[in-house]
Image: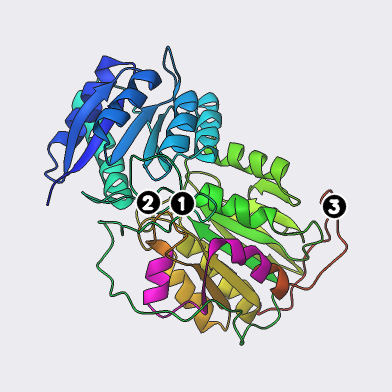
Amino acid sequence: MAPISVLVVDDSMVMRRLITGALENDPGIAVMATAANGKLAIEQIAATMPDVVTLDIEMPTMTGLEAIKIIHARWPRLPVIMFSTLTERGGTATLEALANGAADYVTKPSNVGNVAESVARVRNELVPKIKALASPGGSRVLLATNPGPAVRGQPLSTPVLPRQTLPVAAAPMARTPVPPAQAPTTMGQVEIVTVGCSTGGPEALTQVLKGLPASFSVPIVVVQHMPKIFTRLFAERLDAGTNLKVHEAIAGMPLQAGHVYIAPGDYHLCIKREGTAVVTCLNQAPAENFCRPAVDPLFRSVAKAYGSKVLAVVLTGMGSDGRSGAQAIREAGGTVIAQDEATSVVWGMPGAVTTAGLANSVVALPHIAPMIASAVRPASTPKPGGAVSTPAGQGAS
């Protein structure tokens, strides 16, 4: 089996060498070429058709943000991983790149002087993403709203449903047939919605939240695998672009109807009962599934506080985070929806939940928001306000 071919794009020769060095020792990956700016990257893609591109954001001649728009228009099934700085400017640019077709991102090492440490960090973050997004001869899946060409490298023509590659880091899972998506017949009264997502999650979550009305009558709590700074910017972007009021969660916030609470980077988000209110709590307990924030701690706390009144949604993402939390929700009588394979950028997290038999329904991304909306009773609360949610679910100790 041929290795995954990678094009490395960065204006810094030091970073190009660092990224190449981080990848070259993996026999499953081959750096086929490098480029110093977006214009040269587009020329290299057209000439060599790599399986994956790593793309810097700040470059002369043509920036990464300019390049990603052209790449996504010409080769919409080609996975592009952005290299970003862990700064407000870098976070803003990264979210813009994700909205314009980038598949994922990796933050640059802050100390490139320590070469061995920097190479190890880039390798640990980048290699699993490359292997999750591409196979030696294939291409990743895109969201249903981004159909790709029938043959990679050819201009967009007839929409097709591309195939999916599972994350290499995830344990092998037997693919079992799933029935056509339909609303769970056992779904009871819903008093909270909780969502977990990772790779491909920013755009998937955006699509789901845009599909919910301003009158949405229960709170939504979310873990998106994302570092600090990025989560605040992501919450601000969602707040500006949806009908709901979106916050980066801070400790002690009372949950309100029609409000969305995003776990901050480097903190696990949980919820707990305080009298008649349910409030957020944050902690820096050890990472779970190599992540902090992680989905499992949130799902467990929601199951404890709300019992059978929970509707959980597991969207696209690498690995299996959310599987044990989904089990806690099902054991408490709650309902779990998993995004289907065809519309997931990576079917790791929803696939793990599905193959474990924990999903009540497996649903294409465009149908998830309508299913959530139909499960939650309407309210008249507009976005600027929102009454405090005082659910009647099981109390937490």
Image marks 1 and 2: residues in contact by CB distance under 8 Å: yes
Q: Is residue 363 magenta?
A: yes
Provide residue 187's location: percent of width, then percent of height.
Answer: 63, 82
Mark 3 lies on residue: 385
Q: Which residues are magenta?
A: 350-371
Amino acid bearing label 2: Ala
Q: Is 16 on the left or on the right of 362, as rendered? A: left
Per the model, the C-alpha gap separating discs 1 and 2 is 7 Å
Q: Residue furthest front?
A: 157
The secondary element bearing badge 1 is classed as loop
| Residue for badge 2 | 150
How crowded is the residue under tag 3: few (<14 C-alpha within 10 Å), some, or many (20+)?
few
Q: Is residue 5 left or right of residue 260?
A: left
Q: Is residue 291 left or right of residue 373?
A: left
| Nearer the observer, 20 or 307 | 20
The amino acid type, in three-letter code, at marker 3 is Gly
Dot label at residue 30 = none
Q: Which mark is residue 158?
A: 1
Precedes in sequence: disc 3 or disc 2:
2
Apparent side of residue 213 relative to residue 86 in the rendered image (left or right): right
The kind of secondary structure element at disc 3 is loop
Is any atom of residue 114 visible in this view? no
Identity of the amino acid at label 1? Thr
The x, y position of residue 118, in whole percent, is 26, 29
Image quadrant containing the C terminus: bottom right
